[in-house]
Image (cartoon, rainbow, N blue to C red):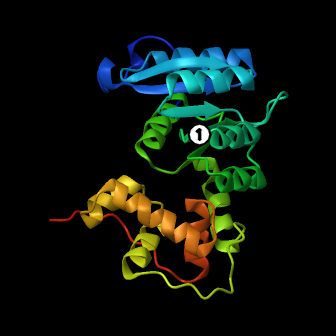
């Protein structure tokens, strides 16, 4: 896709109204990148930047104050790296979804980020319109990875780099096995709920049980486990 201009109506998207805007906090130690992304997102209908900072301590304060729908943060920052900041957020009970936006195309960096529970892994050289769409998808509950990292993600899944246990006697219920198939297909809780005609909270409860039974810490590790054990991904279907 060709690059697009960073000004004018070409960047505006039709979206939600002010009352239900997607609220985002940005954390990046590079001022130019931080300002550019802020201006880019503020041009979008339905997206509101609640704060932007390069200071991890200030970031924690912004998150406590605004409780945003999504945090977009850099991976490597001098005062505190993104994954350490993520651990601090979770330790404080803040479960805000996190998306990484970084220059690192390292498979290991992506693997560590996904294991830590990030919702997305984007690269800073992506087209602006693709970053915007990825942020919207991530906020909806999808796991989003930069297209340039797709092959590396496939390598992780095929190689079992998520280190899911191979020798286990685990008893999942029929419903849990069904949901594990959707997790293997990268489906969000909302998509699973629609397919199975059950509530979003019920899906969340089943996912927690699956992770606990398998001794895993993230949906990505569950997907790795599924691939390693021959669980076929199930695609989204509409229930009657």
In the image, 239: left or right of 184?
left
Q: Residue furthest front?
A: 92
Seen from the viewer's position, the closer of residues 235 and 6 is 235
Vertical arrangement, residue 233 with respect to residue 174, above or below: above
Q: Position of residue 199 (x, y in %)?
A: 29, 57
| Residue at image location 28% in from the left, 66% down from the top | 196
| Residue at image location 45% in from the left, 26% down from the top | 23
Q: Secondary structure at mark 1?
A: strand
Vertical arrangement, residue 230 with respect to residue 87, above or below: below
| Residue at image location 61% in from the left, 47% down from the top | 118
In the image, 55: left or right of 225?
right
Q: Residues within 10 Å of mark 1 (few under 14, many from 20)?
A: many
Q: Position of residue 187 (x, y in %)?
A: 43, 59
Q: Quadrant of residue 38?
A: top right
Q: Quadrant of residue 52?
A: top right
Vertical arrangement, residue 49 with respect to residue 160, above or below: above
Q: Residue furthest right?
A: 78
Q: Quadrant of residue 133?
A: top left
Q: Position of residue 229 (x, y in %)?
A: 58, 83
Residue underneath mark 1: 99
Can the viewer see residue 5 in this picture? no
In the image, 184: left or right of 78?
left
Seen from the viewer's position, the closer of residues 34 and 210 is 210
| Residue at image location 30% in from the left, 26% down from the top | 16
Seen from the viewer's position, the closer of residues 183 and 124 is 183
Q: Quadrant of the C terminus?
A: bottom left
In the image, 41: left or right of 123?
left
Q: Position of residue 164 (x, y in %)?
A: 67, 73
Vertical arrangement, residue 85 with respect to residue 213, above or below: above
Can the viewer see residue 196 in this picture? yes
């Amino acid at each position: 896709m060709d690059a697009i201009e960073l000004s004018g109506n070409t960047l505006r998207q039709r979206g939600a109204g002010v009352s239900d805007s997607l609220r985002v906090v940005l954390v990046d130690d590079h001022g130019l990148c931080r300002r550019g992304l802020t201006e880019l997102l503020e041009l979008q209908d339905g997206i509101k930047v609640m704060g932007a900072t390069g200071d991890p301590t200030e970031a924690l304060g912004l998150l406590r104050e605004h409780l945003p729908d999504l945090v977009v943060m850099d991976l490597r920052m001098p005062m505190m790296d993104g994954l350490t900041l993520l651990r601090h957020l979770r330790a404080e009970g803040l479960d805000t979804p996190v998306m990484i936006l970084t220059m690192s195309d390292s498979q290991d960096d992506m693997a560590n980020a996904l294991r830590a529970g990030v919702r997305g892994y984007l690269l800073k050289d992506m087209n602006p319109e693709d970053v915007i769409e990825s942020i919207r998808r991530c906020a909806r509950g999808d796991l989003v990875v930069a297209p340039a990292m797709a092959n590396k993600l496939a390598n992780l899944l095929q190689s079992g780099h998520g280190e899911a246990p191979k020798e286990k006697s685990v008893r999942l219920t029929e419903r849990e096995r069904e949901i594990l198939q959707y997790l293997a297909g990268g489906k969000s809780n909302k998509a699973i709920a629609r397919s199975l005609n059950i509530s979003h909270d019920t899906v969340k409860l089943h996912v927690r049980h699956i992770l606990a039974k398998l001794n895993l810490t993230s949906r990505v590790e569950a997907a790795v486990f599924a691939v390693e054990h021959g669980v076929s991904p199930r695609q989204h279907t509409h229930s009657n």
